[in-house]
Amino acid sequence: MGHKKVVRIDPLTQALPLGGVDSHAHLDDPAFDADREAVLERAKKVGLSHVINICLDPLKFKATQDLFSSHPEVFFVVGIHPQDGLKATDESFLALEKTLSTEDKVKAVGEIGLDYHWDDCPREIQYEIFVRQLDLARASQKPVVIHCREAEEDCLVCLESHGFVGYPLLWHCFGGDSQLVRRLLKNGWHISVPGPVTYPANKQIREAVALIPADRLLFETDCPYLAPHPWRGTRNEPAYTVFTVQALALARGEDPAKLWQACGENAKRFFGLD
């Protein structure tokens, strides 16, 4: 028997009230070079008031910022990804430090952390650049956005031992279980949920996100990656957050429109958005 054909629902038909925030997007990715303006227009039409774009190279921040010069709704997070540790130079860190101190639209340091899924960068180098950026975040009094893949215990111990319990911190792209949720919450952190929460097999994630208090929950795309059902396997974009929030609301027994706006308010507070 063949697979059942997936009906690709237009996200504009699922629009929610203005006030949602995509808390983690990579709209500077080349995947959006052909239609970035149209993507941002669709984001507005589904009810997103802000998009947080992640710049993974401090030396290229100005070029990234210029892509969105006509979009006041786009704000930025800047940092060195753990997989890029071997590319990081003293110049990179100087650029990050300067950007954090001079650019009002840069709202956090990220995405930073540890990634043991890939072998692109030795773990000791990942750890070194992670701690160095945590120090910059503290010095600049900026929140941090964490990337952690298959490295949860090491990442948590690093953060806890360096005094980041109670610090403004967003655990990006949550895909764990209830035990991880409880530890993140105990540390006083926020949690952002991506599109895979919509996948039928991810019951564990849906059970976990039901435990997150209403004031600690955000949603994201991580686009162009991790498109939610019914767009799984295609290029993700901010407008698809409507499907993520529908799944979140169902898992939590809440109204999608109210959850959409509540998560948006959480993002605005966390990032200090205008």
Image: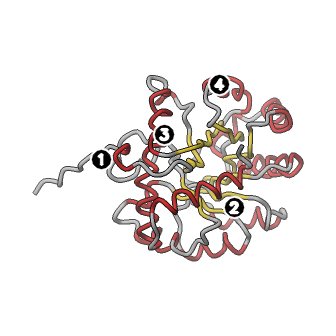
Query: Marks 2 and 3, Cα distance to the nearest angstrom?
Result: 32 Å
- Residue 233 is situated, as x and y percent measured from the top left of the image, at 35, 45
The residue indicated by pointer 3 is 43
- Residue 249 is situated, as x and y percent measured from the top left of the image, at 45, 66
Query: Marks 2 and 1, Cα distance to the nearest angstrom?
Result: 37 Å
Task: Give, as a three-letter code, the residue at label 3.
Answer: Ala
Q: Nearer the viewer, mark 2 or mark 1?
A: 1
Query: Marks 3 and 4, Cα distance to the nearest angstrom?
Result: 16 Å
Q: Earlier in the sequence, mark 2 or mark 1?
A: 1
Residue at the spot 76% in from the left edge and 52% down from the top edge: 143
Question: From the viewer's perspective, is residue 58 above or below residue 18?
Answer: above
The residue indicated by pointer 1 is 9
Task: Give, as a three-letter code, the residue at label 2.
Answer: Cys
Q: Earlier in the sequence, mark 1 or mark 4?
A: 1
The residue indicated by pointer 2 is 155
Query: Marks 1 and 3, Cα distance to the nearest angstrom?
Result: 15 Å
Nearer the observer, 108 or 57? 108
Nearer the observer, 99 or 42? 42
Question: From the viewer's perspective, is residue 116 above or below residue 52?
Answer: below
Task: Tell me the crowding category of disc 3: few under 14, some 14 to 19, or many 20 or more residues within 10 angstroms, Cα based.
Answer: many
Q: Going by the image, does 165 lie left or right of 6? A: right
Q: Which of marks 2 and 3 is nearer the N terminus?
A: 3
Query: Marks 1 and 4, Cα distance to the nearest angstrom?
Result: 31 Å
